[in-house]
Image (spheres, rainbow, N blue to C red):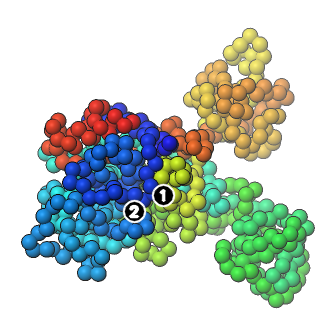
Amino acid sequence: MKVTTFTKLAIGLGVVALSVVGLVVPANADPSGPSSTALVGVGSDTTQDVMDEIAAAIGDGKLASYKSTIGEGQSEFLQPRPDRPVPTAAPTPYPTASPFANPQNLLRAKGSGDGYKILAVAEGSVASLSNVSTFTGGSRTINKGNTVGQIDYSRASSKQGNANTNGEYVNVPFAIDSVGIAVNPGDAAAKIPLEGLGTTSDGPTKATVDSIFRCQAKFVFINNISVGVGTVAGSTFTKSAHGLAVGDRVKFTTTGALPNGLSADTNYYVKAAATANTFTVSATKTGDAVTTTSAGTGSMTIVKTMGAANTFNSMGAAAGDAPANTTAYQVTPLIPGYGSGTASYFIGKIGRTEGAGFPAAGDAGQNCISRTFIDNTTPIQEHSGAAVAERENSMIVYSIGQWTSQTNSDITGATNRTSGTTLLTFLPVVADTARVFDSTNGFGPTRSLAFDTPSAHNLVVGDAVRFSRASGALPTGIVEGQTYYVVEVPYSSGFNVSATLGGAKIVLPDASNGMSGLKITRVIAPTTGSGATLAPNENWTSDLKRVVYNVMPYRKAADPNNPLNKMFVGTNSLVCQQT
């Protein structure tokens, strides 16, 4: 059975409440064949998988949803309907090298904006449109000759068109989707404790989505770990019980001169750790082992700058802002290419305006962002981790519903395009000067200790929290970095926790009474469950929840006798009945 990929919604034109369970749809499966009667849709890949499943659940060939992404044996062209007449004067919008010369063949829309363009031409609103993007990265021109009558609606992960009381099209709300941030789990960027979306006034030391994607916080500073004094002969480094793992980053310092082949203040990658006492390094993640040609002089110290045990220190605008005993890593924010509904939505959330010229190279608040792969040519497809996988310390906006569905591809049938990425947990600060309070007179007849914040914390029973302290130990029984759950809220600024959700309260020891300087962060995970129960977290921050749509002609959506109305509009629609 499929996992829930979208949370429920009940607003607008009698909207679908999506928690779809049904048949597994083969990965990258288009409808099995052209149909004269199906309602045909193209567009956003955010909802392409769940629309496949709804179509399968409805059955009888009533609904056909074509992928925006291309799988094995598929082309950037498709032919959803076999019965449309071939124009007497065949247009030539496609390259002559295309494997499909028949003008009946329809362009496969790459995303929300391109799907809407195709719908507009299919309905005859415009005669032709150029610069329609495809998954292969090329742009094509579409016109009435190859588009009219071929599709009925488009999928969109953000509203299409401009609001107009006399508008021809309507964005019919379909579901709620949450948006998160995907990173490589082994990168320094994965250590960032994102506080949430943030605001447009966030500066370079603020760990928020806004500060990073507005090019304020450009560098993350990671605490170094001293491995100790070691030696090297040729390519083999020796340090007793070094504790290093393949992929860790290290650098070398010396009281004299480094061996030939090594450079100061340079990160190297642990290429192999053959024994507990020996290892090799490479200059790049996949490069050959570095071979030294001299032993150097003085005492050589090995410093681990990135690995599982390294921790986040802070963020800043420049590498030179790095505190002592930390290493600076530049973070590259990525956004899907122009035409993506997810990109358009997200760009609006960070206070910018989507357009073909975004990001502007001359704008210091935009020019840290990339919308292409490293080749600076190929646009990034939404809901794919491929661009993150090739670029170290990058991060990208990603539909949590899509990430969940792709991760469970053996259950859902979706194609896994995550490329091994993980979604960042949000850690908004509840208080950074909390204390442990003797609340004898605060909320009970008997002595009791509680965590106490300077003002109302707004936590509720079941919320997840973590604790840290700039100096000094935490109360006995509380471990820094471990997640705890609010189990009791005796008054507005006080609370107690348990080690497990719904577990027994951890009784704070008397010795911790009066302890101060505690930092408390709330833990908001993008998903819940694991394996077959993995699903988007319905309590994800409201700042990054959005409505996704199906776009169609207003006159058809408003006509109770029209198939589009019966399929999509109202709680009794066929789509709603599958949820």
| Residue occupying the point 37% across, 37% down | 578
Q: CA distance from mark 1 to mark 2?
A: 10 Å
Q: Earlier in the sequence, mark 1 or mark 2?
A: 2
511 relative to 342, above or below? above
The circle on residue 69 is 2
Q: Residues within 10 Å of mark 2 (few under 14, many from 20)?
A: many
Give the percent coordinates (x, y) of residue 560: 17, 35
Q: Secondary structure at mark 2?
A: loop
Residue that badge 1 annotates:
415
Q: Quadrant of residue 224?
A: bottom right
| Residue occupying the point 24% across, 50% down | 38
- Amino acid type, callout 1: Thr
Q: Nearer the viewer, residue 76 or 234?
A: 76
549 relative to 393, above or below? above
Does the rendering let one see residue 82?
A: yes
Give the percent coordinates (x, y) of residue 315: 61, 57
Where does the C terminus fall, quadrant-wise? Answer: top left
Query: Does residue 18 appear left or right of residue 164 in this picture?
Result: right
Give the percent coordinates (x, y) of residue 356: 32, 66
Q: Residues within 10 Å of mark 1 (few under 14, many from 20)?
A: many
| Residue occupying the point 89% across, 64% down | 241
Query: Does residue 87 appear left or right of residue 258 in this picture?
Result: left
- Amino acid type, callout 2: Thr
Count every numbered label the image shows and give the total. Answer: 2
340 relative to 437, above or below? below
501 relative to 299, above or below? above
